[in-house]
Amino acid sequence: MSSREPVLIRVFKAPHCATTLTQADWSLLVRQARSAHVLGHALDTITDACGLAVLPEKAAAALKSERQLAQHRIRSTIWEAKELARILGSIGVQPVLLKGGAYLAEELPFSKYRFFGDIDILVPHAKIGITEKTLMTQGWISTTRDTYDQRYYRTWMHEVPPMAHIQRGTHLDLHHNITPLTSRYKVDAKLLLEAARPAAAHPELKVLAFEDMILHAAAHLFSDGESESAFRGLTDLKALIEADRISHEVLILRAKQLELTLPLALAARHVAKVFASGTAQQLSDALHADNGAASRIALLDPIYDRVFLGFHPSCGTRGLGPARLAVNLRGHLLRMPIRLLLPHLLRKALRSNKEGAETPRPLK
Amino acid sequence: MKLARLQPTRVQERLTGQGLILATPPFTFKIRASSPEVRNGLLAAYAEYEVLEDPAWVDFEIHLYPAPGIRRWLHPLIALSIDGQTPFDPLPATQAFPLLEWAMNWCVTSTAHQFIMCHSAVLAKGDNAAILPAPPGSGKSTLCAALSLSGWRLLSDELALIETDSLNVVPFARPVSLKNGAIDVIANRFDQAVLTPRVHDTIKGTVSHMRAPRDMADPSHPARPRWVVLPHYSDGCEFSFVQISKAEGVAELARNSFNFSAIGQVGFESFAKLADQVDFYHLNYSRLDDALEFFDTLAAGCPA
């Protein structure tokens, strides 16, 4: 396996191996990392271990590109988050930052280069109405006017329809939970909100408790149905699990309480498998000892093994198409019971391909 | 080895096999395609470019392939993937070469944020560069093609790659994209212009690409921006030009930039510093001769 293992995975496993890479390896590494949406993270991991001088000229240019993007992204995200905290503070709501925004507010090293398209915040369900109205008075508007979409989000999902700022164009997802109302994973959002705390680097911003951050990332990765950014999700979990900020006992207990043991076990198993992570392996073993049912998750290996390697054509994963389809289907089934899912998917299928890929066009 | 030195059958073998590695400094593309339109377009437009042997540094791997589905028998479409990503909808198979060109531009504009990038042509006399930012329809490409055949060095037809620290423009000389009436204007006036076969009914109308003149000694030699000229072609209009303020000029650069809002402060500071070393002009013209003369006057006032 080792010689055929994708170079991107080799450098995440053992960043020091970068000193032995050929030019062709480097070139492939940059392309694999770019397709997996972890270019900055991968190059940063390497330079942390081996110094900047190890980068060939073109890899150094790629890192500069990622750095210039990251500087602006960090600055504008933190600014927007503080602005949201200020606006909602006026009605006594303290929004809790989720995902990418929260990682930045904590200054978690892996988050520096992590691209994300929107800011996600969590507020109490009872405050959703007033929060949405208050945001609207400050220029945040709903991005969809389609009545079906509006109903879909409001009746079944864990968030209101996505919002965007009318002038700055920033996208905002306003959540009242981290899993859909109709989801198989039933998380009690009150527990999340009670445990939320000030962010390490920006105490005026709130984030989830560290164990809840891990559980949210795991629940998202293993129920989302998206394979496009699956590898990036797994690198997030690797970093979160290896950050060593909480004991495995606390994490496992919390997973039980939030009914997220299954996604946590999947996360530990695949981080351990893909990155040969000792910490993740220990967590995985502890979960197995604790919960016999967790061994069922091995049945999903044929699907996830392929999906996590599917970030670049050079990884040559056979059966990738069916595996992606299976992940997508699994995501749908976890999100909604079949009696709701079938009419929903039928409706989406009949609604022509209006939102297809970008139409090819010349520059501008 | 130059593409022109490679037998067309060898070119075909590479395109349908492991891929043709084409160096268009500062980026290298590996291209795989079975379509004859792609091969013919490449042979016409990139004859003077280096083809590299594996293993070489490849920045982007582009694969063009017939789009699946029953439509392929009636109305064949061509699809394109870039390192496994498919950012574009398929196009009619006849448009394969323009699709490849647009995809090559997209590869750079969506990833090369080490530069502040501007949608513009860039030409140089000696080391002094003129940046021509302009929206489509302003005659930028026509003017760019004419200048590149009249003693100006082509750095780019579509995209100024400006280094954020030195503020130099890094050349990325590729074929010049000519549209509709401009194709005949250039073909009739310049015997030496080499054009790819015309492709009709694209999103931009009829398109043909002009081979970049490659007479410059060092294609990777950067140039220092000295002028920013905003061209505006209008049929029958009086020739005129006017110098505009630096503030207005920076706003024009920002408006035409691909990544000004993505890199924020670095981009703003680069444009602001650039404004200190360039003069900004609006240029209105209907006759190419007037415009060419204007550029030569600029260059004469500022010996390289």
Image: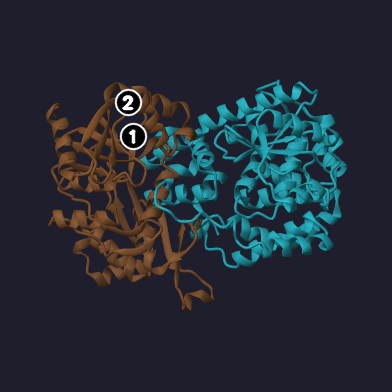
Chain colours: A cyan, B brown
According to the image, label 2 marks what residue? B274
In the figure, residue B237 lies in which quadrant? top left
Q: Which residue is mark 1?
A: B162
Left or right: residue B275 versus residue B237 is right
Residue B206 x/y as whole percent: 32, 60
Q: Residue at x 60, y 65 (%)?
A: A321
| In the displayed structure image, the side of residue A17 where residue A144 appears, left or right | right
Q: Amino acid at mark 2?
A: Leu
- Label 1: how many Cα within 10 Å (few below 14, some 14–19, many 20+): many
Callout 2: 10 Å neighbours few (<14), some, many (20+)? Answer: many
The local secondary structure at tag 1 comes to: strand
Q: Quadrant of the N terminus of chain B?
A: bottom left
Picture coordinates of residue B214, whole percent (x, y): 18, 50
Q: Which residue lies at the image location 78% right of the left edge and 35% below the top edge?
A: A247
Total numbered circles: 2
Q: Amino acid at mark 1?
A: Ile
**Mark with earlier residue (1, 2):** 1
Helix, strand or loop status at disc 2: helix
Q: Nearer the viewer, residue A119 or B74?
A: B74
Mark pair 1, 2: CA separation: 10 Å
Q: Is there CB contact under 8 Å for labels 1 and 2?
A: yes
Residue A87 visible in this rendered orientation of the protein: yes
